[in-house]
Image (cartoon, rainbow, N blue to C red):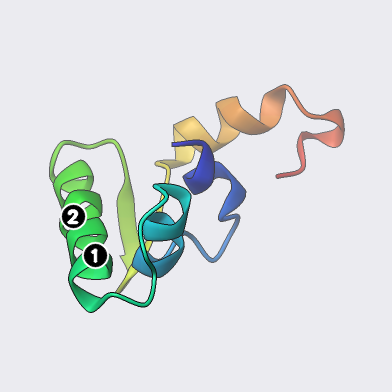
Amino acid sequence: MAAAVEGGRDGLGARRAAGVLGWDTASASRVEGARARLKRLVERGWLVEEKPGRFKLPAQEQEAAGAGRPGGVL
């Protein structure tokens, strides 16, 4: 979830998520596994996918995450 916050306005891609999980980002199966997990988090309402393949926190979660930072900047 912290990686989704750091993804900023563009969001988090599956390759970056695989890297955060410590998986081999050169392996297509690992990247697809990360994408499947991100899609599952979208279904459960933990993430949103505004652009195809770009995942980020819902708006209210982004506001809460930015509230603790100086200036509220992500």
Kind of element beneath mark 2: helix
Residue denoted by label 2: 39
- Image height check: is 10 above or below 44? below
Q: Are marks 2 and 1 in contact (CB under 8 Å)?
A: no
Q: Position of residue 33 (x, y in %)?
A: 18, 60
Mark nearest the camera among 2 and 1 is: 1
Task: Classify 15 as above or below 8.
Answer: below
Type of the residue with mark 2:
Lys
* Residue 40 picture location, percent across and down: 14, 47
Left/right placement of residue 69 relative to residue 52 reads right
Type of amino acid at the residue the image marks with label 1: Arg
Cα gap from disc 2 to disc 1, whole angstroms? 14 Å
Front residue of 16/67: it is 16
Q: Residue at x 28, y 75 (%)?
A: 27
Q: Looking at the figure, which quarter contains the N terminus?
A: top left
The residue singled out by tag 1 in the image is 30
**Is the residue marked by circle 2 packed among few (<14), some (14-19), or many (20+) residues within 10 Å?**
some
Toward the viewer: 46 or 26? 26
